[in-house]
Amino acid sequence: MAKTELMDKTMQRGVEPPGNLRAIPSPDSIDVTRTALLLDVDGTLLDIASTPDGTVVPAALASTLQHLLARTGGAVALVSGRTIATLDRLFAPLIMPAIGGHGAEMRLSGGNPIAKHWPAPLSQKLRRKLHALAGIDPRLLVEDKLHSVALHYRLALQREDLLKQEVAAIVAADHASELESVFGKAVIEVKAKHYNKGTAVTELMTCEPFAGRTPLFIGDDTTDEAVFAILPDLGGYGFSVGREMAGAYGVFESPHAVRAWLAGLAGKAEPAA
């Protein structure tokens, strides 16, 4: 049996394959009626933009996701650090199941209300300090989600070391035992320790239409490590994007490669660009 065929069959059983197999399974090897698709957004479905507001959702991707929702019976969820309200604006008019704010929010279907798993916002004092820190350079951008605050420095990469030091000091002075700094691609986010993408995925997989299915996760960043870590306990598997990550079965080259693969899974062709 060929390596790719072995990996495809093994992953359909939800069991870790032997060896260090890195092939991406062919879309037609995935039983979408028994699979729950869990998809990170920035850097996975979408190309990273220089600013959060500059992100573009290709029309073909929205169509692919709509087809996948139909084929899976609704078992496709976005798993993002963005709020669900922001995801809805990005993917409009498509409204999807989603985990937002790194696990602070969850919605099981487009018709369901958004559940807040950590409703208490960060303190005004802490948020004020983080906003003030961004004032050292006009190229720094603040994304305030109330339950977390993200500092984006893609336009000022030389500020990375300073920002990490200053954020660490701010967190240490404000309930450090309850907070954590999460480091992504040119972003530092401060949030409560009590939830993450992994805890949210674990809960999501107990709910219909996800319960009883094999979770298949695709992610690209350090915030996605919490999901890769819990997938074995759920009988699932995942793939990283752009680089190898602990717990990932294989690596997609780019978000475009992810979109093309998902289009194949949806039974439709993906444009080359």
Image: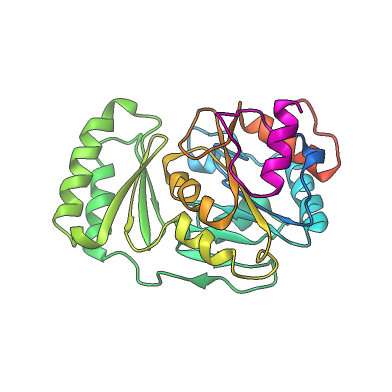
**Residue drawn at point x = 80 percent, y = 33 percent:** 270
- Is residue 225 inside the magenta stretch? no
Against 87, residue 223 (above or below) is: above
Q: Is residue 61 left or right of residue 105?
A: right
Residue 89 point in image, percent of width and height:
62, 55
Q: Can see residue 180?
A: yes
Q: Is residue 217 left or right of residue 62?
A: left
Q: Can see residue 260?
A: no
Image-quadrant location for residue 106 = bottom right
- Is residue 10 inside the magenta stretch? yes
Write down the region rendered in magenta. Answer: 1-25
**Residue drawn at point x = 40 percent, y = 72 percent:** 119
Q: Is residue 81 left or right of residue 257?
A: left
Q: Quadrant of the C terminus?
A: top right
Against 23, residue 97 (above or below) is: below
Prevailing secondary structure of the magenta residues: loop
Residue 1 point in image, percent of width and height:
76, 28
**Residue drawn at point x = 39 percent, y = 34 percent:** 186
Q: Is residue 124 left or right of residue 248?
A: left
